[in-house]
Image (cartoon, helix red, strand yellow):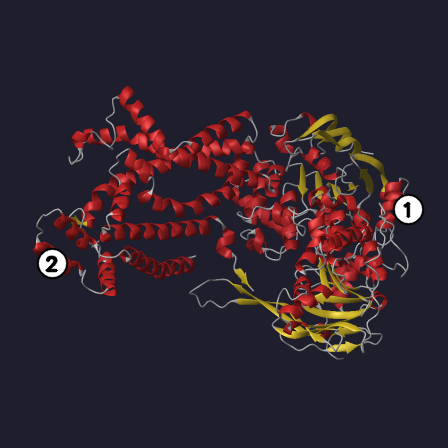
Amino acid sequence: MDEPIISVRNLKVSFEMATGEVEVLKGVDFNIGKASTIALVGESGSGKSVTAQAIMGILPSTARITSGEIIFRDPQSGSITEISALSQDDPALRKIRGGKISIIFQEPMVALSPLHTIGDQISEALFLHQQTGRSEGLSRTEAMLDLVGFPDPSRALRTYPFELSGGLRQRAMIAMALVCRPALLIADEPTTALDVTVQAQILNLIRDLQHDLKMALLLITHDLGVVANMAEELVVMYHGKVVESGSAKDLFENPRHPYLSALFKAVPRFGMDKDDRLVPVRPIDQKLGAHFQRKPAIKSQSNTLLKVNGLSKRFTIRSEGLLSKAPSSNIQAVDDVSFEIAQGECLGLVGESGCGKTTLSKMLMRALLPDSGKIQYRGPDGPIDILSLEGNDLMAMRKKMQLIFQDPFSSLSPRMTVFDIVREPFVIHNEGDLQAQRDLVQELMQLVGLDPRFLNRYPHSFSGGQRQRISIARALALQPELLICDEPVSALDVSIQAQVLNLLKDLKNELGLTYLFISHNLAVIDYIADRIAVMHRGRIVEIAPRSELFSNPTHPYTQSLLHAVPHPDITRPLDFKAINALGGNDPKRWPAVFRFEVGENAKWIDLGNQHHVRAHAT
Amino acid sequence: MLRYSTRRLLTMIPTLIAISVIVFVIIQLPPGDYLESHIATMQAQGESIDQKKIEFLREQYGLDQPMWKQYLDWAFGFMQGDLGYSFEYDMPVNDVIGDRMFLTILISVVTIVFTWLIAFPIGIYSATHQYSWGDYGLTFIGFIGLATPNFLLALVMLYFANVYFGTSIGGLMDPRFIDEPMSREKLFSILEHLWIPVIVIGTSGTAAMIRRLRANLLDELGKQYVTTGKAKGLPPGKLLRKYPLRMALNFFVADIGNLLPSIISGAEVTAVVLSLPTTGPLLIASLQSQDMYLAGSFLMFLAILTVLGMLVSDLLLAVLDPRIRLQGSISK
C-alpha cells in the first residue's frame, strides 16, 4: 500500500470550558490512503467534526491539541508536513488549507457568504493558492461550475448564494473546495441538509469527481445509508475514541463493537415487517399513568376523523413595495389537496423541503387560513367545519389537535422550566388547579419516559431527544385525538431517532391516537405510517397504503424518492443511473400522463387497494 | 436599483408633508402667539409698543388668519427658502440660523470622524481579541467614557485647557474674532477651541460605537462562512476585512440615518455648558419662547435630515447587501 496522505496518531484535543478542560478527542488513530474513501461515523458529540477541524487546522480558539500528531504527505511533491505542530495562521498550513486539503460543510446556506457572488468566493481559493491571472482564474472557475453541474456556469459566476436552491448551493460549495484540485476532500455531513433526491445527485457528483481528480475523501456522517454507498473504509467513533475501524464490507457484514451493531439495529430500513421494532441504542422506560389512558371509542356514524377537501394556499411574493404596481409573483404552496385520516390511523406525508407540508399542517391547525377548500373534523353531531369555527368553539377544537415540531431546540422556550412548558396547555385552557396540574404534568413526564424530578430544569440541560420528548409531553397534555408530527425526528441522531419513533408508536397504540406524520425520510415514514401520501410542489401526487406504495410505486416522483433513499446495506447500492432516468422532482421530465398544466384540475386514477395516483387517464 | 431609488425618493414626499403638518400643529397648540405674549409683557412693564410694527408683522405673517392658511403660507415659504421671521431675534430666520449653521456642521462632522477613527480600530481589536486583557482594558475605558456626564467632562476639560494651554473659556473662538471675517488667525483660533467639544461630545458616542461594533463583529466571526474562508486558506487580515467586517458594516450604515439629524440638534446640553455658538442651544431657546417660525424651521430641518439620513442608509445598504437589493419579501 502507498504511504497514507494523512496519518492521525493518538490525537487528543481538549476544549476549554467554564467548568474546566474537557477532553473531546481521547486518542484517535487512523490513516487516509491516497485516493481512498474513509467514512467517519458516530453520533453528534462523538468528535467527528473536531477531528476534521484538527486536520484542517481550523479548530475553534477554545480547543487545543494536547498530544498526538497529524502528518500530511503531499502526494505530488512528497513533502511531509506535521499539521498538528503548526499554528493556525502559519503560512505553511494556510497553503495546505484550501490548496491541498479542503472541506465542505453541512449547511450550504450559512457556509457561503451572502454578500459575495459565487464566482468571487470560488475563484478566491484559486487566486490564493495558484499563480493564475484574473481571466484564466475566472474561466477555470467557470469550468469547475460546469463540472459540478451548474446549468449556466457563466451566469452562475455572478449569482449570490441566496438566489440558488439548496442543492445548487452545495454544488457551489463543492466547486469551491475542488477548484484547486486538492489531494483530500473532507465532507462534513455534506448531504444531511438536502432532500433525498438531491442527496443522491450530490453523492453521485462527489464520487465522480473523486474518481476524476484522484483525490481522497474523508466523509463524516451519521447516516449509515450514505456510508454504505460511499465508503471503502469505516472509522467508528464513540465519545472521542475510535471504537472500530476496518473495511466497510467487513464492518457492515460483521460489526464487532456493540455500539456499531446497536447502531445498525436502530436505523429504520425498508421492508421491515409490521411488528418489527427498532432497537434504540439507549432504550427509555415509559409508563402509563392513571389519568392518561385510551379514551373509550366515540360512537359515530363514520370512522373518518379528519377530512380535507380541495385545500389551497397561495403566497404572494412582493418584489417591489408601496407605490409600485410591479406584478407580484405567486407561489402555490398548497394546491388542491384532499385526503382523509381515519380514527386510529397514521397517515404519513412525505415530500421534499418547500413542497408545502408545513403550510398544510399549519392550515389544519388554523394557524394559517387557506384561500379555498374545506377541513372537516369529526364531531358528536356530524362533521365540524374547522375553518368556520370562532371563539370558544375554536378553543375547544384546539384541544383535539396538537402539533409536534421539528426543531426541539427552538420549539421550547429557554426561559421556562420544563414544568411550566408542559403545564402551559392547562393554563391556556384553564384546566384544574395548580395541584391537579402538577399531578398531570408528572404523569406526562413518565408517559414519555422522563424523570419527573427534572421538572424544575430548563430545556438547555436536556439533549435533543429528551427535548423532543418534552415537546411530545406538552402536545399530549390536553389529551388530543389527532397529533400532527412535523418532521419530529429529522433533527435527531439515528440512535435517538429510534427511541422517539418507538415512543410515538407506543403512545399511538396505548392512547388510541391518530397521527398525521410529516417527514422527508421515506424509511421513517415506512416504519411508522399505515398509509402514505406523497406530496410534490403543493400537490399530493400519490396516496396508498404503506405496503402497496412500496411494492407498487406508480408516480415517477414516488419512484424517484424510493430509488434515491440510500440503504444502510452494502449489498444494495444506489442506482444513480436509474435515479437520473426517473426525472426526480422535475415535472418536465416525467412521462406526459403525469404532467399537469398550472391550474389544471386534479385527475385521480384509482388503482384499487386504496391506491390513487394523480395522472391523466390512459 | 434605479426604480428602487426613485420610489424611495417619491415616498419621502408624503412623509415630509405629514411631518410638517404635525410640527406646525404642535407649535400652534399653546394658546396665543408670540406677539400676544410679547405685547402683554411690554405693557406690563409700562413700555409703549410700536403698534405699526406689530400690525405689520401680523399682516406679514398672517397671524390673524386661520391656522390652515398660516400653515400653507409657511409651508410654501419654506419650500422657496423663506423660513419666516424670528420674533425673538427680530430678523429673518435665515439670518439667525445661517451664522451658526457652519460652525454646527463643522463640529458635528469633526466629531463624527473622530468617533469613527477611534471606535473602528478599537471595536475590531476588541472583537478579534475577545476576553483578552486588551479587550477588557479598552472596554473599561469605553464604559468610563459612556458613564461620564458630558457636561462634567466639558467643565473639567475647559478648566485644564485654560490652565495649561491658555485657551479662553467657552465658545468656539477667541472672543476678539467674533463677528470678524474669516482669516488665518480666526481659523487657527477655531481649531484651537474645537478639540474640546469634539472630545466631549465624541466620548460617549465612541464608547457606544465600540460596543456595538464589537457585538456585531463577534456575531459575524462565529458564523460558518468565516470558517469556510479560513478553510480556503485566507490570511487572517484579509479574511476579516472581506467577510465578517463587511457584514458588520450593515448596522453601521443603517446608523447613518440617526447620525444626520444629530448634526444640528446633537449635544445641546454640552453646547450650552461650553457656550458654543451652534444651533442646539438656539433650538431650545426658540421652543421656550414660542418663537414659532424659528422653532418650526428647526424641527423641519430635523425631519428632513432624518428622512434624508434614512434614504442614504437604505440606498447604501442596497448597494452593500445584495440580499436587500435582489430579494423580494413574502406577504401572507
Q: Secondary structure at mark 1?
A: helix
Nearer mark to the viewer, of 2 and 1: 2
Tell which residue pokes out farthest to the bottom in this image. A617
Tell me residue A207's x, y (percent): 74, 48
Q: Amino acid at mark 1?
A: Glu
Chain label for disc 1: A
Could you tell me which secondary element the residue under label 2 belongs to?
helix
Callout 2 crowding tier (Cα within 10 Å): few <14, some 14–19, many ≥20: some
Residue B203 locus on image (x, y percent):
39, 33
Report the residue at 55% width, 30% height from top. Answer: B129
State the residue position of label 1: A253
Q: Quadrant of the C terminus of chain A?
A: bottom right
Report, in whole angstroms, how far the alpha carbon at label 2 lies from the one at label 1.
107 Å
Q: Are marks 2 and 1 on the same chain?
A: no
Q: Position of residue A29 (x, y in %)?
A: 80, 31
Q: Residue at x 78, y 35 (%)?
A: A240
Q: Is residue A460 visible?
A: yes
Q: Is residue A87 above or below residue A540?
A: above
Residue A248 to residue A78: above or below: below
- Report whether B29 appears left or right of A145: left
Q: From where the camera sits, is residue A578 visible?
A: no
On-image quarter of the N terminus of chain A = top right
Residue B179 position, x and y percent, is 16, 36
- Say what amino acid the circle numbered 2 marks: Glu
Above or below A17: residue A226: below
Q: Chain of mark 2?
A: B
Left or right of residue B102, residue A419 in this image: right
Q: Residue A61, located in which quarter of the rendered image?
A: top right
Left or right: B261 as drawn, with respect to B80: right
Count of numbered marks: 2
**Residue on which disc 2 sits:** B55
